[in-house]
């Protein structure tokens, strides 16, 4: 019977593998199709300055409303795309969409804050990210300092020398760099010092249990202190309550991203929140006229 159990569990296991492999292949095909049909769109989740409570940035997040299967969350299809070169196509597509959108908002006379885009670490070792970003910025006449790239902690560990070079080239274009989901990986402190990044984003998993979990309180406090010592700013992601906000504010956290302030917004709802560009000289003229 032991043998039989062993055999059964093997059969079950291999069936499960087949289902997973089939699902992966199906998703991969559907992502290719969706790219060709331009079926994805981006939403923008504001980041708030803790002190002024004003919008200082936003994270661009991809959304997919599949014609047959409904909404497919990024956590399902991004990892599939990451298993092949598909992720390179998807990233270029996202960069093009976001930079085009920044340019449109600017043409509408809106003050556009820094918009961040997620770039999985694998992209850094393949393709030419820097050239592609630079070309897209040029294509839409957007300056680099409107763009932020969210990298993962994994990048701080893999292929260090090459990645530092790439990040430095991005910094030369005035692009901001933030480390996403900070605290969940095992980034070495010496790499963190060497890496040209401006922002640490504390992962939601640490924020969730604030301030009940004393351990998480200590971790969050330590990350904020470390970041400030290194001259970096800190974003807390996934802030959902007033208590969390107050606690992070007391610890000196710089920015907040989370449902407590804003859920991800579609492009029009986000644009409504933005200020109009102020032309100081015009204001002076009208003030003089008014007098
Ligand atoms: P992430 O980069 O850490 O993004 C933050 C995720 O947390 C987003 O989920 C956001 O909607 C969610 N979130 C923010 N505040 C709160 C909150 O207060 N409560 C809760 N419960 N959730 C909150 P989303 O959009 O489903 O994205 C999940 C992950 O998928 C992202 O994690 C990122 O790794 C990936 N992803 C999303 N969009 C893109 C993209 O355009 N490109 C790539 N490469 N990855 C993306
Ligand atoms: Mg992110
Ligand atoms: Mg994150
Ligand atoms: Mg996260």
Image (cartoon, helix red, strand yellow):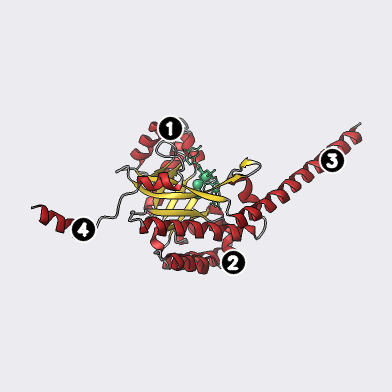
Q: Are marks 2 and 4 in contact (CB under 8 Å)?
A: no
Q: Circle 2 is placed at which residue position? A: 127
Q: Position of residue 291 (x, y in %)?
A: 8, 53
| Mark 4 neighbour density, 10 Å: few (under 14) some (14–19) many (20 or more) | few
Disc assigned to residue 211: 1
Dot 3 falls on a residue whose secondary structure is helix
Disc assigned to residue 10: 3
Q: Circle 4 is placed at which residue position? A: 280
Q: Position of residue 38 (x, y in %)?
A: 57, 54
Point out the tag, 2 or 1, that comes first from the N-terminus: 2
Quadrant (top left/top right/bottom left/bottom right) for the N terminus: top right
| Mark 1 neighbour density, 10 Å: few (under 14) some (14–19) many (20 or more) | some
Dot 1 falls on a residue whose secondary structure is loop
| Mark 3 neighbour density, 10 Å: few (under 14) some (14–19) many (20 or more) | few
Q: Are marks 2 and 1 in contact (CB under 8 Å)?
A: no
Q: Nearer the viewer, mark 2 or mark 3?
A: 2
Point out the tag, 3 or 1, that comes first from the N-terminus: 3
Q: As drawn, is 130 to the left or to the right of 66?
A: left
Dot 4 falls on a residue whose secondary structure is helix
Identity of the residue drawn at 32% across and 45% down: 54
- Nearer to us in this view, 268 or 246: 268
- Give the CA separation, mark 1 to mark 4: 44 Å
Question: Does the rendering let one see residue 62?
Answer: yes
């Amino acid at each position: 019977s032991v043998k039989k159990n062993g055999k059964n569990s093997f059969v079950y296991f291999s069936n499960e593998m087949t289902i997973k492999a089939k699902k992966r292949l199906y998703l991969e095909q559907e992502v290719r199709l969706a790219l060709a049909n331009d079926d994805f769109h981006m939403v923008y989740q504001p980041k708030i300055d803790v002190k002024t409570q004003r919008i200082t940035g936003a994270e661009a997040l991809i959304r997919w409303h599949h014609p047959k299967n409904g909404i497919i969350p990024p956590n399902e299809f991004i990892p599939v795309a990451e298993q092949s070169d598909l992720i390179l196509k998807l990233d270029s597509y996202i960069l093009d969409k976001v930079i085009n959108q920044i340019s449109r908002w600017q043409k509408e006379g809106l003050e556009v804050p820094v918009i961040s885009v997620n770039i999985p670490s694998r992209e850094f070792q393949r393709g030419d990210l820097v050239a592609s970003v630079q070309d897209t910025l040029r294509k839409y006449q957007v300056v680099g300092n409107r763009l932020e790239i969210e990298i993962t902690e994994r990048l701080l560990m893999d292929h260090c020398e090459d990645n530092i070079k790439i990040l430095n080239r991005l910094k030369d274009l005035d692009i901001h760099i933030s480390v996403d989901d900070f605290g969940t990986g095992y980034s070495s402190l010496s790499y963190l010092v060497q890496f040209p990044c401006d922002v640490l984003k504390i992962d939601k998993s640490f924020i969730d249990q604030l301030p009940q979990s004393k351990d998480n309180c200590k971790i969050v406090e330590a990350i904020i202190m470390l970041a400030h010592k290194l001259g970096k700013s800190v974003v807390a992601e996934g802030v959902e309550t007033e208590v969390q906000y107050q606690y992070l504010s007391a610890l000196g956290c710089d920015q907040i991203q989370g449902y407590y302030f804003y859920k991800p917004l579609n492009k029009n709802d986000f644009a409504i929140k933005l200020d109009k560009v102020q032309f100081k000289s015009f204001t002076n003229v009208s003030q003089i006229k008014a007098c």
